[in-house]
Amino acid sequence: GAGVSQSPRYKVAKRGQDVALRCDPISGHVSLFWYQQALGQGPEFLTYFQNEAQLDKSGLPSDRFFAERPEGSVSTLKIQRTQQEDSAVYLCASSSGDSYGYTFGSGTRLTVV
Amino acid sequence: LAKTTQPISMDSYEGQEVNITCSHNNIATNDYITWYQQFPSQGPRFIIQGYKTKVTNEVASLFIPADRKSSTLSLPRVSLSDTAVYYCLVGVINDYKLSFGAGTTVTVRA
């Protein structure tokens, strides 16, 4: 597609509920990234994929967070047993690997109540 | 990644030039300087990138002095639609672990 698409745009989850956030990167982009942005803060790195391989997951806050990209295109970020501190905007970005500028999606705003 | 320091906020009026200076005293030889723009409810958008001297594109100019310990993003003749958060980042080309910091909130008033 023309840009990075994320769904849903907004998600309200009850504490303890599992959620799944989807990212459709730009077609053909090899690299895919997930970032978390708390209110009033800059985005913070969560994890990085090159094709289907998850090369770095050092930014995932806890083992409740899990990301996958099984076919090297669409990616899903799953959060199990959500907590209030998980409330944030989750941003996905993709890159063709030939430039420093990544293309970000509009994000999914997760609110845990 | 080199730590960056930039102002928390800046106010301006339509038609003025806005200059945002970012300090990065510990920039490494292989690091580039990149600026992103973020509007409310959107993801960051790449604006400009440079290594030294001056870079200009249709959106902005980036001035980098010889010692590279700081850089200045210049937005010419801003409009209301330039109200956004601007982030200064330093790092190697294709570094996937971007460090955004808190950014500079630029507010343009009529």
Image (spheres, coloured by chain):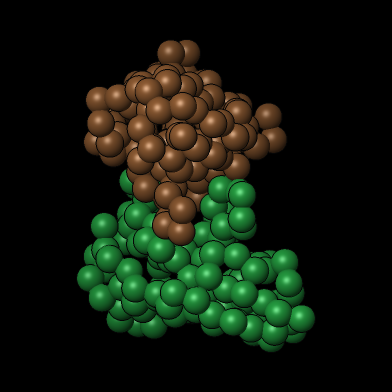
Q: Residue at x 73, y 72 (%)?
A: B80
The x, y position of residue A26, in whole percent, is 60, 31
Q: Residue at x 25, y 31 (%)?
A: A62
Let me know if residue B35 appears in the view: no
Q: In front: B3, or B52?
A: B3
* Corner quadrant of residue B85: bottom right
Colour chain B is painted in: green
Placement of B55 over or under A93, stated as above or below: below
Q: Residue furthest top?
A: A71
At 45% from the left edge and 34% from the top edge, which residue is drawn?
A: A112
Identify the residue at horizontal 52%, vertical 66% (top origin). Answer: B86
Image coords of residue A66 (percent x, y): 34, 23
B76 displayed left or right of A31: right
Nearest to the observer: residue B56 or residue B16: B16
Q: How many marks?
A: 0
In what quadrant of the picture does the N terminus of chain A appear?
top right
- Residue A27 vs B23, above or below: the answer is above
* Frontmost residue, B63 versus A86: A86
Q: Is residue B25 above or below residue A6?
A: below
- Place of residue A64 in the rendered image (x, y in percent of width and height, measured from the top left): 30, 24
Q: Quadrant for residue B37, please give it.
A: bottom right
Q: Nearer the viewer, residue B58 or B12?
A: B12
Using residue B91 as the reference point, say whether residue B109 is left or right of it: right
Instruction: Give coordinates of residue B43: x percent, y percent.
Output: 56, 48
Q: Is residue B22 visible?
A: yes
Chain drawn brown in the picture: A
